[in-house]
Image (cartoon, rainbow, N blue to C red):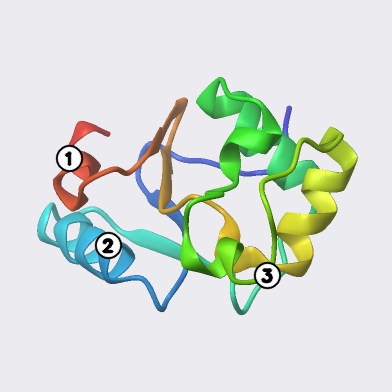
């Protein structure tokens, strides 16, 4: 059992409150009439265990959670090939570089590419 609690009755949305995609995704989710728990990664520090669990649920490597093409990354960093532990630290110290929003509902986890993806869960 992981650290992240999920429910069929609620969508948990890991996101960046400054992201227009996250705000649009939240609007779509609310329109579906399902309660939404928002975890704003800029305000709530996510643990290393949560980062590992999100990557596992998405079926990706931890490094794949980092958007190395996003301005939040390219302004501060060059493209890197780091260990999983170093990627976790980088995400924790710079949450704006993590790909998001990530939506969870029960056993389903998706990386939202377009706001309407939220209806898939």
Among the 4 quarters of the image, the one containing residue 51: top right
Q: Say how many tags the image has.
A: 3
| Disc 2 target residue | 21
Q: Residue 34, percent across and down? A: 24, 53
Q: Nearer the viewer, mark 2 or mark 3?
A: 3
| Disc 1 target residue | 119
Q: Would residue 3 be seen by someone viewing this image from the given angle?
A: no
Q: Residue 27, percent across and down? A: 18, 66
- Structural distance between the alpha carbons of marks 2 and 1: 14 Å
Q: Residue at x 56, y 27 (%)?
A: 57
- Side (left or right) of 88 relative to 76: right
- Side (left or right) of 13 relative to 67: left
- Structural distance between the alpha carbons of marks 3 and 1: 34 Å
- Side (left or right) of 4 relative to 37: right
Look at the numbered discs 3 and 1 and tell me whether their residues touch, using CB distance below 8 Å. Answer: no
- 109, 32: nearer the viewer: 109
| Disc 3 target residue | 76
Q: Residue at x 56, y 49 (%)?
A: 68
**24 over 121 or under it: above or below:** below
Q: Quadrant of the C terminus?
A: top left
């Amino acid at each position: 059992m992981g650290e992240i609690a999920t429910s069929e009755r609620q969508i948990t949305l890991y996101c960046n409150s400054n992201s227009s995609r996250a705000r649009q995704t939240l609007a779509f989710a609310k329109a579906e009439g399902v309660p939404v728990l928002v975890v704003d990664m800029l305000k709530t520090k996510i643990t290393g265990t949560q980062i590992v669990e999100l990557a596992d649920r998405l079926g990706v490597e931890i490094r794949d959670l980092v958007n190395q093409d996003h301005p939040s990354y390219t302004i501060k960093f060059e493209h890197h090939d780091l260990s999983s532990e170093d990627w976790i630290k980088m995400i924790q110290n710079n949450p704006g570089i993590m790909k998001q929003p990530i939506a969870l509902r029960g056993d389903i986890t998706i990386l939202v590419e377009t706001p309407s993806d939220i209806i898939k869960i």
